[in-house]
Image: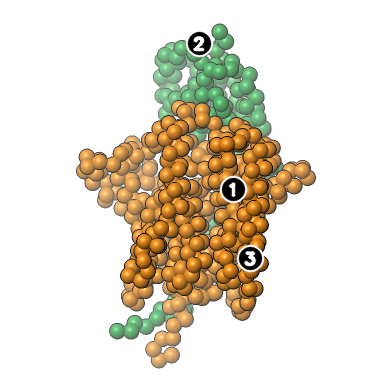
Amino acid sequence: MIRPPVPAVLVGIALCVFVAISVRSMWPRICDGQFSAPTPYHSTDRYLESVLGQDASAKLVAGLAKLPPGKPIIILSPAVNAQSAFISALVCYLGWPREIQGISVDAADASSEVAKIDPHAIAAIMFYNIPPPVWLPTVEAGRGLHIAVMEAK
Amino acid sequence: MTFGDAINLGLALAVVFAAGIGITDLLIGRNSGYSKLERWSLAWLFGTGAVSLMLWLAGFVVSGDVRLRIVVVLASSTVAYLGGKTARQRTPQIRGTRTIIDRTLFAIVLCEIVAVFVMSSRHGLGWDGLLNWEIKARYVFLNGGVMPAAYFGSVSRAFSHPEYPLFIPLTETWLYLWLGEANQFWAMTLFPVFYAAGAFLLAAITTRVSGSQRAGGLAAALLFFVPYLHTGGGRVISGYADFPLSICYLATVGYLASAARDNSAAAFRLFVASTALLPWMKREGLILCVTAAACAVILFWRRRPMRQWLFGFAPALVIAAAWRLYLYTMHVRPPLDFVSISFTSIAASSNRIGPIAAMTFRELASVSHWSVFWLLVLAALLISACRKPDRQTVALGFAIVAPLVLYCSTYLFSAWPSIAAHVTGSMPRLALQLVPVAWCLVAGILTRESQQPGPGR
């Protein structure tokens, strides 16, 4: 049996419907974003700006370089928070070749987690969106970011 | 950006294109049926593949950015010279006639490419683009052009998937070696070029496979309108490997179909080269290789000696095996995303089949990601099924459906605590890998349908 072909008009309408729906959902995404200078840290600066302000990546790299060398850093961030995990991964990305261990904890458990850490084995503890224990001296490095630098031994 | 940076960036890209055009000309041989745009699109694909492979291999014997650049430039120049010699023996191509519709579609595609370039300058690399791919490029650059062994042993960087192959990272490193710094912005400029190459290749391959220039132009023009290409992880500009992989898969399936249709040795060689790049781009490339092998069986069953055609997969298998061996010698831990396949794990995961199928269906029906794209694909498949499809249509349909089924089946062995998070997080990107092949099929079938004279017409 020879089946009749799909009329060209129907094909045209189907493709027009596809384009119309697409444009509606694509348009806001096409228009968002803004031009920025072609800097080496073009993408990481965008992500870290809310935490560390302008030139965030360079500041972070410079800050990490000042910490006692050869020892790892621990980052404590809230559990079940993709943004915090991402920020901690970015610190890891920028901190090469140092080992930077991200640990997800509940805010209430931060103190007990810190108590388990051997201070001589690490260079620093970073707290992202987690209040540091009151007994640990820390420096506020950025919005929601505190650093406790361990003494070099 | 200084004048020196611009020159260095231009030189880096020139070497990529020189290697690529050399390889393309060697593969095409004296066949004059390939347009300039198709050759340049293939040149980008093969050039990036060749430069990244050369950097990886050269890294075993030399180190230091200058020495690595010299080795790659010499190798690329040699390939370009040999390719140029072959190209000179080719008879000039006679240009086909182009209607006003073809010209309009071409202009639309050009405008879309410009739009993608503009968008890329307004956005940054995506999460995975940065933390799975560019991270490797950065560390290779900081280590003088060679992947540091310490990276594979770094427990804290296991999130960045050290087992992922180095096509994208080493192409980014190539730019860094010339620029003298790891620069996230310039790394991002590679991806609009992949889009441009993909759009032109889609037009060329659809024209080749469907026999209609209009179908080719239509497919290339409509590619831009798949919303997921401009969304988060799917953004073609966000530095993920999925879109480049989708182009490579299109070239694999397209030239395989073309080789079967026209009995063309040049198309067969292009298919072999494209297939070889699949496992070098992403882990899923192996699944796509297996699918392509099945497509070859569909296309050549009882028509040609199968052994000859399946031999075409040898380069891909060699590259995949070499990468596995490299990972083994680097003591890379197996990825934590999946449990090992066993009878126990299969039995334990059987209750996941329903939820995975439902989540996949929901994803493909998502208007914000795909508009009605997958509905068009389904319609095209149903129409062709009603028409007693030829082998080529069956193979193209299989090339879309089989990877989708295989991708879904991998979730049966997901080690994620929430399978829903795993499926929703990765399925859109996996589906993206099939979009150009699906456009090729849809445009071919719909154009053929609408051009057929109906009864009584």
Q: Chain of mark 3?
A: B
Mark 3: secondary structure: helix
Give the mark, 3 or 1, whose residue is nearer the N terminus.
1
Q: Residue furthest top?
A: A153
Q: Amino acid at mark 2?
A: His
Name the foreground residue: B140 vs B138. Answer: B140
Relative to B263, does residue B44 appear above or below in the rendering?
above
**Residue B56 seen in this snapshot:** yes
Residue placed under numbered mark 1 in the picture:
B51
Q: Amino acid at mark 3?
A: Ala
Which chain can be seen in green?
A: A
For the residues labelled 3 and 1, the Cα–Cα distance comes to 21 Å
Residue placed under numbered mark 3 in the picture:
B87
Name the foreground residue: A119 vs B257. Answer: B257
The 10 Å Cα crowd at callout 2, few under 14, some 14 to 19, many 20 or more, is few
Give the left or right position of residue B410, taking residue A110 as reference: left
Residue placed under numbered mark 2 in the picture:
A120
Work out whether disc 2 and disc 3 sit on a shared chain: no
